[in-house]
Structures are given as structure tokens and as C-alpha cells.
Image (spheres, rainbow, N blue to C red):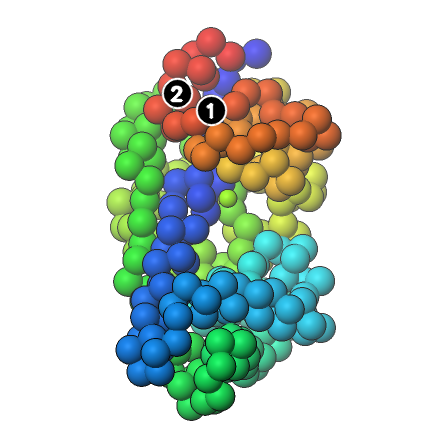
Amino acid sequence: MTVKAVWFDLDDTLLWDERSVREALQAAALLAAERTGADPEALTAAVERETQALYESYETYPFTQMIGINRFEALWARFEDTEHPIFARLREIAPAYRQEAWTRALRAVGVDDPGLGAELAGRFVEERRRRPYLFEDALPTLDQLRPRYGLLLLTNGSPSLQREKLAGVPELASYFDHIVISGSFGEGKPSPRLFRHAMALHGVSAEETVMVGDRLTTDVLGAGSVGMRSVWVNRRGLPRGEDIVPTWEIRSLRELPALLERA
Ligand SMILES: [Mg+2]
């Protein structure tokens, strides 16, 4: 069936979040290296481990998993969200989570200094905020698609954080007829209820819509659950198992316009 609407995931599909996080972690680790002589690579690896263990230990973890808020986002999100009472709990937990993650990581590389842990936690927030990266193929592709298709952004996350990310690249939001954030709806991708909610909002059927995203377990699986076709954006050429199968797979968004015309 002819495609009428194209839906996009945000993080690591249009916005290069992984690079922003990696660089911000490195910048904070370099500050620690200057102060203490600690190996910045070992510290970065340690904070990746410690954030994982700590983040999973909070009672908020099932909620953050369901909405789709990862441990690096929790290192800088303001959690100024009112849609669900758990956001207030996340706002309470966040300062201790950040300081403790960095303090434990420092300890793992032989530095016992909670004060420095707190400083690194703050440095990461600043460094992450100043790095809103768009992939180079995002805007040229959206320019090509916008005259021909309805466009909707379907992103998992804390509404205030996702809006802050969008504010960092002001030209992006105006491409979309609607912006749907899982934390506002109350369930994240791959929930079929979220996809149906977005279809009702956009006034489209699953058959005439294509979901474009970088994650098989959320974007591709969720689309498939409502009978919607999907494009897996596999920028790094990762191998794919047989359990979740996208309709199409691309390496660059630049492949999209021609693909959609043939669909
Ligand atoms: Mg993504």
C-alpha cells in the first residue's frame, strides 16, 4: 500500500545521542585525570558499569525501562515531568544517583573522593547539554520527505528531557505534524497501545505508515505488533538475529526517499 505517513524515532536515529554521551563521559573523565592522574579510559568504563548496577537497583527501574529512560539520560535529565508521580521520585533520586555513580567509578580506579564524584556528576550534565548532535543525513532527508508524507516523531523518554533535546536542535521539531513522547502517554515503544494512540492522533492506518528507527526491540517490534511496516536504521552494520525482522534495513537515512517510493 502507498505510504502516506513516516514516523521517526529520535535518539540515535535523528539525534546522535550515543556520541553526545560518549564525549560527555570522556570530558568528565579528563577532568578527573587532570586532578588525580586516574586513567580516563578506565574511569569511563567504570562509570558505565557503576551506572548500570546502581540504576537497576532503584525501585524506579521497572518504570524507566517501560517508558524508555536509560541510565545515561538519568545522569542529566531534570525530570521536571508531572505526567506520572514516579517522575517526582526520579527527581529526588537523581542527585544521589549521579554523585554515587561517579564516586563508585572513581573508587574503582583507586580514587576515594566523594567531593570529586559530585563535581564530575555536575560536569557531565554541563558537557552533555552542550552537545546536541544531529546526524548529517537527518535534515536533508526530512527536507525531501516533508512535501510528500505526514511526519510524526515517536520517542521514548522523559517528556522534559526529550523536549530539551529537541530544543538543542531548533530546526528539527518543525518537520513533524506531531511529537509523541512515551512518558506523556504512559507506556513506551514497543507498546502497541502507544502505536495505536499515535495512529489516532495522526489520523493514519498502520498499513499506510512506516516506522523508522535504530532499535529492533522498540521501533521495529512495536511497529510489527500493530501491522505497521518498519525500516531499521543500522548505521553501524550490526548483525541481526532472526527473532525481530524489519521490513527494510538501511545504513543511512539518505536511502529512505527512494525506498518509500517503491514501498
Ligand atoms: Mg533510538
User: Which residue appears at 53% of the width and 29% of the height?
Assistant: 232
Q: In this view of the protein, which residue sits in the foreground, 263 or 16?
A: 16
Secondary-structure class at tag 2: helix
The circle drawn on residue 185 is: none
User: Which residue appears at 52% of the width and 68% of the height?
Assistant: 46
User: Which residue appears at 58% of the width and 74% of the height?
Assistant: 90
Q: Which residue is mark 1?
A: 250
Secondary-structure class at tag 1: strand
Rendering coords of residue 60 (x, y %): 67, 70
The circle drawn on residue 255 is: 2
Amino acid on which the number 2 mark rests in the picture:
Glu
Residue 95 seen in the current view: no
Tell me, yes or no, whether the two marked residues, 1 and 2, touch with CB atoms within 8 Å: yes
Rendering coords of residue 241 (x, y %): 67, 30
Amino acid on which the number 1 mark rests in the picture:
Ile
Q: In this view of the protein, which residue sits in the foreground, 74 or 87?
A: 74
Residue 138 seen in the current view: yes
Q: Against 135, is 53 above or below?
A: below
